[in-house]
Amino acid sequence: MANRRLAPASEQPESFAFSPENAEWAKTQIAKYPEGRQASAVISLLWRAQEQNGGWLPRAAIEAVAAELGMPNIRVLEVATFYTMFALEPVGRFWIQVCGTVPCDSCGARGLKEMLQARLGPPGHVSADGTFSWLEVECLGACCNAPMVQINQDYYEDLTPESLGQLMDDLAAGRPVKVGSQTGRVSSEPQGAVNTLTDPTLFDGSRVGAWRKRFEEAGKVETPAAQTGEAASGTQQAAENPKPARPDVGRPIERPASDAPAQRAANGETPVKAEDRADAAERGRSTAKHGSARPGDADVLDSPAKRVAEGEPAAGDQGHQDVPARDAVPQQPEASGASAGEVAAEAEEARIAGALAALPKDASPERKADAVGKRPPGLDAARAGKPDDLTRITGVGPGNSQRLNGLGIYHFDQIAAWSRDEITWVGTYLAFPGRIDRENWVGQAKALSAPAQ
């Protein structure tokens, strides 16, 4: 990284003042913030001061911004020295900022820096003709297209030492240059051919509900042994390596493991001792003391030990449910609170997904719609040349309104008369099965087409 220091006194101008235009602009920036928060405009004012001063910030400009905002000079100096976008020394006509963070460094930024060092000299110095200067900075946010540089306000990406050298030659000669990737990459696409997310079914709606089928198939593959393996492994581990009743807490004397039911079962003994069963069968007596029961003592009829002794399930076993396997599809509640429209929409999505799975991936919208429903009758033109405003139906935007018009659907009463097969056809054609039911297009259309009372 660069050494963030002000330029030597010999290069500092004696004074700095905003031009009339920039002074007026500065007032508009300060006015964006409430009274007492004018310091929030410090970055924008420093940037304009740098532009006015030929691309770098002298001490006088920093102090002028501080006076304009009523800030201590040191506070503005802290901002100027923190951000590398502020040049604290004179720069060339083309200021090259080389990103040296890990992605760019891994993709060849060191070669760019070596080329600039050989051509221009150390960072922070202006070339003899005043055309170039360069600086290493931290992440400039174009990691996908590394290595890259910023020259003045523009990014140049996917560089090599050779392509950067040619770019500098073109800039110096005044020839037009290409901003962005220098290898033809568009935006941040993967290097080379685009080979991910190319399946059109990801975008045309035909995969709606397909996740249900995948989970159902995954649940069928699982074997009973796999379902119980985790529980069996835990029981075996408890029997083979039981924990002591109390931690040793650093005591030097070792003690045998507790006489746990799992340990006794592993040794071939009964999990519950005979004396424990006898104690559990006692009535009207506390298990913590052996005195006779008092008249007001509660009966110990409902204790877990008593139920175990009599062969009944303990409290923790009552209402026990088998834990489903991790890959199993969770069972849906019978009453989820969904509306009738939502239930119908989910059922339609599942049915359509199964029907569309048999079609080729490149099937046209009409072919997909014909496979699951029936096209509603349409009109050649709107009646009397005045179509209804279909966007009054919630869920029908301008785009869908035009597509419906393309199917010959111009009026509310046409939508109000759709049958179940016709609803399915339109929903599949528009690539959102179930939405017509979910948003109740037919019901809305009936209300809109009804004569005014």
Image (spheres, rainbow, N blue to C red):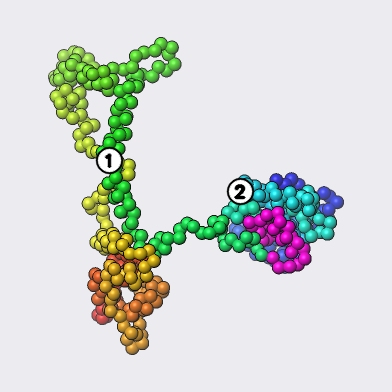
- Please state if 254 lies on the left or on the right of 451 as rendered: right
- Please state if 203 lies on the left or on the right of 298 as rendered: right
Q: Are marks 1 and 2 in contact (CB under 8 Å)?
A: no
**Secondary structure under the numbered disc 1 in the rendered image:** loop
Q: Which mark is residue 103?
A: 2
Of 238 and 1, the residue lying toward us: 238
Q: Which mark is residue 76?
A: none
Instruction: Give x and y (percent) for residue 250.
Output: 44, 16
- Is 157 contained in the magenta span? yes
Which residue is drawn at the image coordinates 19% and 15% (left, top)?
Answer: 275
Instruction: Name which residue type carries label 2.
Output: Pro
Which residue is drawn at the image coordinates 20% and 23% (left, top)?
Answer: 305
Of 276 and 405, the residue lying toward us: 405
- Please state if 86 lies on the left or on the right of 388 as rendered: right
Q: Residue furthest right?
A: 10
Instruction: Name which residue type carries label 1.
Output: Thr
> Mark 1 and mark 2: span between their CA atoms?
45 Å
Which residue is drawn at the image coordinates 83% and 59% (left, top)?
Answer: 129
- Magenta extent: 149-177
**Secondary structure under the numbered disc 2 in the rendered image:** helix
Mark 1 and mark 2 lie on one chain; the one further toward the N terminus is: 2
User: Is any part of residue 301 visible from this angle?
Assistant: no
Q: Which residue is mark 1?
A: 223
- Please state if 276 lies on the left or on the right of 259 as rendered: left
